[in-house]
Amino acid sequence: MGIKITSKGDWSKTRKWLFEMQHKKYLAVLDKCAQQGVDALAQATPVDSGLTASCWDYEIVYDNSGATITWINTNLADGWFNVAIMLQYGHGTGTGGYVQGIDYINPAIRPVFDNISNTVWEVVKGNG
């Protein structure tokens, strides 16, 4: 018993979609999404001087398996200790005390993850 498949019309939309997937056109939306992450993190960062909030950036690394977005904060205390991490997880003081951290990164970045997922899916489906 065989299977017979017939079709009507042309395959232009399918060919276009396959071309875009082959050439990873869907990755082009990641810059916009990554910048949204920077904006969300900057807005959510506790502000004293505003320096830490203004030091958010991102990098996107592309490889054969896809892409990885990394958000980076370049504000370093004493040239080595990341202030954004210190605010997130807490830190010891020079006099033996401890300052409790504030979970501001996870709530700020969760909607960005959801947006990335939805946006990339729309592009992959051919709607973006």
Image (cartoon, rainbow, N blue to C red):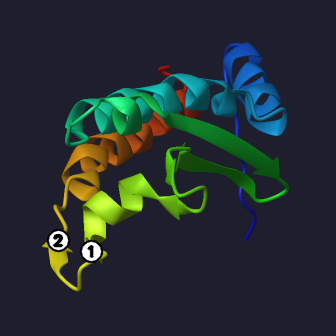
Image mark for residue 99: 2
Tell me how far mark 2 sits from mark 1, CA to CA: 7 Å
Give the residue number, with chain letter if any, for mark 1: 93
Q: Could you tell whether 63 is left or right of 41 in the image? A: right
Residue 101: image location, x then y, percent: 19, 67
Looking at the rendered structure, the kind of residue marked 1 is Thr
Query: Dot 1, crowdedness within 10 Å: few (<14), some or many (≥20)?
Result: few
Q: Verify CB contact (< 8 Å) between mark 2 and mark 1.
A: yes
The residue closer to the viewer here, 74 or 104, is 74
Front position among marks 2 and 1: 1
Q: Quadrant of residue 11?
A: top right
Crowdedness of circle 2 by 10 Å Cα count: few (<14), some, many (20+)?
few
What residue type is disc 2 on? Val
Report the disc number at residue 75. Answer: none
Residue in the foreground of this view, choosing between 28 and 61: 61
Quadrant in the rendering for residue 112: top left
Image quadrant in which the N terminus is located: bottom right
- The vertical placement of 56 against 76, above or below, is above
Query: What residue lies at 41% left-to-right and 28% top-to-bottom?
Result: 54
Query: What is the x, y in percent for residue 5?
Result: 70, 44
Q: Earlier in the sequence, mark 2 or mark 1?
A: 1
Left or right of residue 54, residue 31 in this image: right
Q: Residue at x 75, y 14 (%)?
A: 12
Task: Find the residue positioned furthest to the bottom.
Answer: 96
What residue lies at 82% left-to-right and 27% top-to-bottom? 19
Q: Secondary structure at mark 2?
A: strand
Which of these two is toward me, 101 or 68?
101
